[in-house]
Amino acid sequence: MGDIVAVTGNEACAQAFKQINPDVCAAYPITPATDLMQRFSSFVNDGKVDTELVLVESEHSAMSACIGAAAAGGRVATATSSQGLALMWEMLYIAAGTRLPIIMPLVNRALSAPLNIHGDHSDGMGARDTGWIQLYSENAQEAYDNTIQAFRIAEHLDIRVPAMVCMDGFIVSHSIERVEYIDDADVKKFVGEFQAVNPLLDMDKPKSYGPLILTDMYHEYKRAQHEVMTKVPNIVREVAADFEKMTGRKYDLFETYRLDDAEIAVVVMSSAAGTTKDIIDQYREKGIKVGLLKPRMFRPFPFLEIAEALQHLKAIAVLDRADSFGGYGPLFSEITGAVMSMNSKPAVINKIFGLGGRDYLPDQAEQVLDELVTIAKTGKVETIKEYIGVRE
Amino acid sequence: MSKKYWEKLPQGSVVLEAGSSAKFKTGGWRSMRPKWIEENCIQCMFCWMYCPDMSVKVTAEGKRAEFDFEYCKGCGICALECPGKKGNKAIVMEQEGK
Ligand code: SF4
Ligand code: SF4
């Protein structure tokens, strides 16, 4: 077994990078992800890894460097947050469309304006349509474990899709927690040797990346990209099964907590799931049948599996740590999409919480659960979308 | 079961065949046509160097030859860069199809 340490989420991800020793990493600082690549740059400086670290002049360049290095045939990673991800936007689509398995921890942070450096999911949700796999982590342990699994998932020869590993800015990235590391040798064995597909550096077989493809074939390329995403869930589960054999830690497309016999439930991602579980325990003691579903894989979204897990419920509250202004919260849209396929349709409400790092406190979870109890009783939804934890 | 068209596409739209751009004849784009006036030509080879489509042919002796109109798209860069002889251009652009 590996060491048990007290580390931050950023430190844990940097450790995963060190153990995996990517061929090329690009780095451009942005709070709260700065610290992750800064720690990794120390490993480079101290000769702990033989990664070629490219210090670029913007996140747009960081992702461009990753794309070039991945097309050349290397195992590639970087990390970013918020505005940095926003600046990468066009390159994210190119990485995914070109099917380059780049790994990127995304330390979730609010987007400007107003300027805010704290955690929410606005950045990740903005990138949900880019074609990247997205895994969300509740704590530092999950961020570390997801990073290691992400390499295996993204690099799987049946898919070759880039992956983001998300964790909540500051709440997870900068809080010190107990984390179980995996031995270096086991991590190496688990991720395996990198296998390049169509590398540019294979001089005997010259090839071109990034061609112009117009009305005659673009539609077909997108059809193929859609197909690839349908293969991701099984691979995520296969990799999780192997990971469990190595560590005993269980992962799936989503996690459920006291959900099987529940009548009402909360759907929430990342660190807020922890607080919610505590309040669920308190309500269970009062005899209220409440459970939780925490999506881990937001892209591709496991609609059918989630529908199956939620179909016995009377009422569901979806908590979004991001808003789609003029629409419902992004997670709510997916959950109601999943509910579409069910025969019995539970009532679903949407709460927007914790924007710009606003604390998600136990009384907010209690407020949501009380409302769900009433909805389950009356069958009536008063307000579909509402902000909670907001000063009034 | 036979594979569908989109299932046979190379992953990530990578072009696996080297030099396949030779199949893409850009000559059809041309609305202006460069004309070489040989007596004004000083064989500086600027046109050969500047042409973005490798459409200025070169003889076995390394001398400037005719344009390759299968690929020349009529951009006019060669005509602009051509110094010519004593102020007389060795390349002029003319309306295509005249
Ligand atoms: S017109 Fe343009 S494409 Fe044609 S030969 Fe001159 S430089 Fe080349
Ligand atoms: S640039 Fe003009 S002068 Fe020079 S080689 Fe070409 S045609 Fe002749």
Image (cartoon, coloured by chain):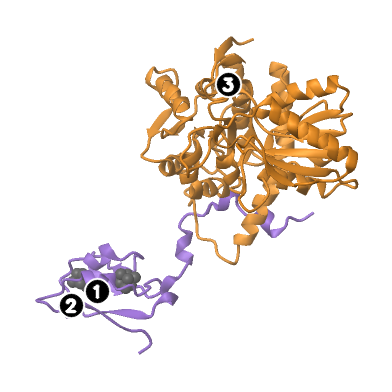
Q: Is mark 1 within 8 Å of ligand 1?
A: yes
User: Do callouts 2 and 1 mark residues in contact (Cβ within 8 Å)?
Assistant: yes
Residue that mark 3 sits on: A188
Label 3 marks a residue whose chain is A
Q: Residues within 10 Å of mark 1 (few under 14, many from 20)?
A: many
From what the image shows, is residue B59 above or below residue A183? below
In primary-sequence order, the first of circles 2 and 1 is 1
Q: Nearer the observer, disc 2 or disc 3?
A: 3
Residue that mark 2 sits on: B89
- At numbered mark 2, what does the secondary structure look like: helix, strand or loop? loop
Chain that is orange in the image: A
Chain that is purple in the image: B
Compare residues A35 and A385 and report the one nearer the observer. A385
Q: Is mark 2 within 8 Å of ligand 2?
A: yes
Label 1 marks a residue whose chain is B
- At numbered mark 3, what does the secondary structure look like: helix, strand or loop? helix
Q: Which mark is residue B79?
A: 1
Ligand 2 is in which quadrant of the figure?
bottom left
- In the picture provided, is A194 more to the left or to the right than A206? right
